[in-house]
Image (tube, rainbow, N blue to C red):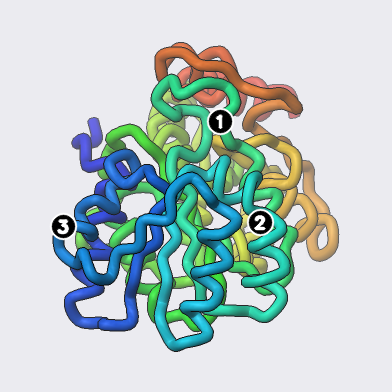
């Protein structure tokens, strides 16, 4: 049983504050959601480096772009639905095209947005952002990896989209874990199927793999925290080892990790690829466990789907 850790949004707020102590270039722009995204932690520590932009996301991204041209490292903080969907043109034209050093954090991403309403659910953000030239896309699994990913993306000179979730999250990694931009991490070995997962869904797949092991199915689990640039070599090698691939994500199966893996293997090493994620649909509000179950990405549903796929081969 994994211990419960802090929410990724809390780890983000704490870490950007810690990094700012040693890096005066770091500033934060907030879209009037600081107490939710937890950049209020930064605001209290560095009020003179915190910019409250209000509910004006397109303008906020434009200001961040301008700040980046002056040598600052702006972290833009708001919900994923506002950062990606509402301000997309500003990201594309003002940040991605000139490849400016802006870090865009999409809070409350995925399915579990605290019953904020279907309009606030954003589970096609990875598909949108990874299709954009010059954009790096990162989705950490737990607070340990979030803190390490924050350091890596701060050191990286260029635009980054960091995908963050709302709920408290079990701790998958210990202090020996080392996040490296553009690299995967093998969580467990197995010879029946290779499962690639990303973000907090990796934790659910890890728990599902334990259920599968009790049923005699050994799944190789590979965590993919950087969806762009993708660690193509590691994906090809892991796929070769089992000859059968499943992808799992708290994201639509269209264009996310599943799409990225399928594209890579289709080009370089064709094997059967099955995708687990949300269907071509919009979400709805509800309790976390009920939503995970309804949309087929709970631990139990994930285990059952993988088992059925493996036994059907």
Q: Which residue is labeled 3 in the image?
A: 44
Disc 3 and disc 2: Cα gap in Å? 31 Å
Which residue is painted at 16% across and 57% down in the image? 44
Disc 3 versus disc 2: nearer the observer: 3
Disc 1 and disc 2: Cα gap in Å? 16 Å
| Front residue of 255 and 101 | 101
Question: Could you say whether the residue bearing mark 1 is in a helix, strand or loop?
Answer: loop
Q: Earlier in the sequence, mark 1 or mark 2?
A: 1
Which residue is painted at 38% across and 31% down in the image? 207
Picture coordinates of residue 224, whole percent (x, y): 52, 55
Task: Determine crowd level at label 3: few under 14, some 14-19, many 20+ residues with C-alpha closer than 10 A.
Answer: few
**Quadrant of the image containing the N terminus:** top left
Question: Could you say whether the residue bearing mark 3 is in a helix, strand or loop?
Answer: helix
Which residue is painted at 58% across and 67% down in the image? 62
Q: Is residue 165 above or below residue 138?
A: above
Q: In which quarter of the image is residue 208?
A: top left
Along the horizontal axis of the image, is 21 left or right of 217? left
Disc 1 versus disc 3: nearer the observer: 3
Picture coordinates of residue 288, whole percent (x, y): 41, 19
Q: Which of marks 1 and 3 is nearer the N terminus?
A: 3
Q: Which residue is labeled 1 in the image?
A: 121
């Amino acid at each position: 049983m994994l211990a419960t850790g802090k929410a990724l949004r809390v780890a983000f707020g704490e870490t950007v504050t810690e990094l700012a102590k040693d890096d005066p270039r770091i500033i934060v722009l907030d879209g009037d959601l600081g107490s939710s995204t937890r950049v209020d932690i930064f605001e209290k520590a560095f009020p003179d480096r915190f910019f409250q932009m209000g509910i004006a996301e397109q303008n906020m991204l434009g200001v961040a772009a301008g700040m980046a041209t002056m040598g600052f490292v702006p972290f833009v903080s708001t919900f994923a639905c506002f950062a990606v969907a509402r301000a997309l043109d500003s990201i594309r034209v003002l940040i991605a095209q000139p490849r400016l050093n802006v870090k865009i954090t999409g809070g409350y991403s995925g399915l579990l947005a605290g019953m904020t309403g279907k309009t606030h659910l954003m589970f096609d953000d990875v598909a949108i952002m990874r299709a954009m030239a010059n954009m790096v896309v990162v989705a950490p699994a737990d607070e340990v990896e979030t803190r390490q990913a924050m350091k890596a993306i701060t050191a990286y000179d260029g635009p980054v989209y960091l995908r963050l979730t709302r709920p408290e999250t079990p701790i998958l990694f210990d202090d020996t874990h080392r996040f490296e931009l553009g690299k995967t991490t093998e969580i467990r070995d197995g010879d029946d199927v290779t499962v690639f997962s990303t973000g907090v869904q990796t934790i659910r797949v890890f728990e599902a793999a334990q259920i599968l092991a009790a049923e005699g199915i050994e799944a190789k689990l590979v965590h993919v925290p950087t969806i762009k640039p993708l660690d193509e070599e590691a994906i090809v090698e892991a796929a070769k080892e089992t000859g059968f691939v499943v992808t799992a994500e708290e994201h639509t199966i269209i264009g996310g990790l599943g799409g990225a893996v399928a594209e890579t293997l289709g080009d370089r090493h064709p094997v059967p690829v099955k995708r687990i994620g949300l269907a071509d649909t919009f979400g709805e509000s509800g309790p976390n466990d009920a939503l995970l179950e309804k949309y087929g990405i709970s631990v139990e549903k994930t285990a059952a789907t993988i088992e059925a796929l493996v036994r059907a081969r």
